[in-house]
Image: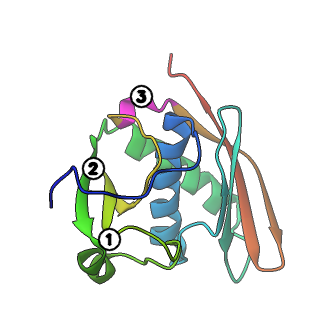
Amino acid sequence: MEQNSQFNAHNKDEYPPAHSAEHILNQTMVRMFGCERSRHTHIERKKSKLDYPLPSCPSPEQIMEVERKVNEIISQHLPVTMEYISQEEARKLYDLGKLPQNASETLRIIRIGEYDACPCLGTHVGNTSEIGTFRISSTRYENGMFRIVFRLSNKE
């Protein structure tokens, strides 16, 4: 697929380290809890929050394991790359339920090493070593939704 194909523009200005950490957190939640990727997401430089539909609240130990696993992936210094594929091809590989109805025929897929891949228009780091340390600052479980609030700090 040609990279100069026409595709939708992104309507947000995200903080690349936090947005890249969001991808890793999403894949970690999918792998650990068998849930879908975050249903509601708000990514900012100072703090970010994501909501996951879960049948019950994760234990404190599970929450600590999520944080540990996200930091483990970050510490692997994985490349963050992109490729362009058709919607038809993407439909076979990814859940396209969040795509807007007017989404372009060409989609951009963001890959974080072999750990995560999904359609995305946001801005990202070039390598997970640029993310810093991931810290879950709070969680909340209400009406079947589990909210994670996280912050990033520079590695020192």
Give the percent coordinates (x, y) of residue 81.
27, 45
Which residue was labeled with disc 1? Answer: 105
Where disc 1 sits, the SS reads loop
Up-down relation of residue 98 to residue 71 (above or below)? below
- Which residue is farthest right? 142
Where disc 2 sits, the SS reads strand
- Which residue is farthest left? 1
> Could you tell me what secondary structure mostly forms the magenta stretch?
helix
Name the front one of labels 3 and 1. Answer: 1
**What colouring does the structure picture have?**
rainbow
- Whether 124 is among the magenta residues is no
* Residue 4 relative to residue 151: left or right: left
Give the percent coordinates (x, y) of residue 131.
47, 33
Which residue was labeled with disc 2? Answer: 82
| Quadrant position of residue 2 | bottom left
Which residue was labeled with disc 3? Answer: 130
User: Alpha-carbon neighbours of circle 1 within 10 Å: few (<14), some, or many (≥20)?
Assistant: some
Q: Which of marks 3 and 2 precedes in the sequence?
A: 2
Q: Nearer the viewer, residue 108 or 151?
A: 108
Name the front one of labels 2 and 1. Answer: 1
Locate the N terminus by quadrant.
bottom left
Give the percent coordinates (x, y) of residue 39.
64, 70
Q: Amino acid at mark 2?
A: Met
Q: Amino acid at mark 1?
A: Glu
Q: Which residues are magenta?
A: 128-132
Label 3 – label 1 distance at C-alpha: 31 Å
- Whether 130 is among the magenta residues is yes
Label 2 – label 1 distance at C-alpha: 16 Å
* Residue 85 relative to residue 117: left or right: left
Q: Amino acid at mark 3?
A: Glu
Q: How many marks?
A: 3
Q: Residue at x 39, y 46 (%)?
A: 73
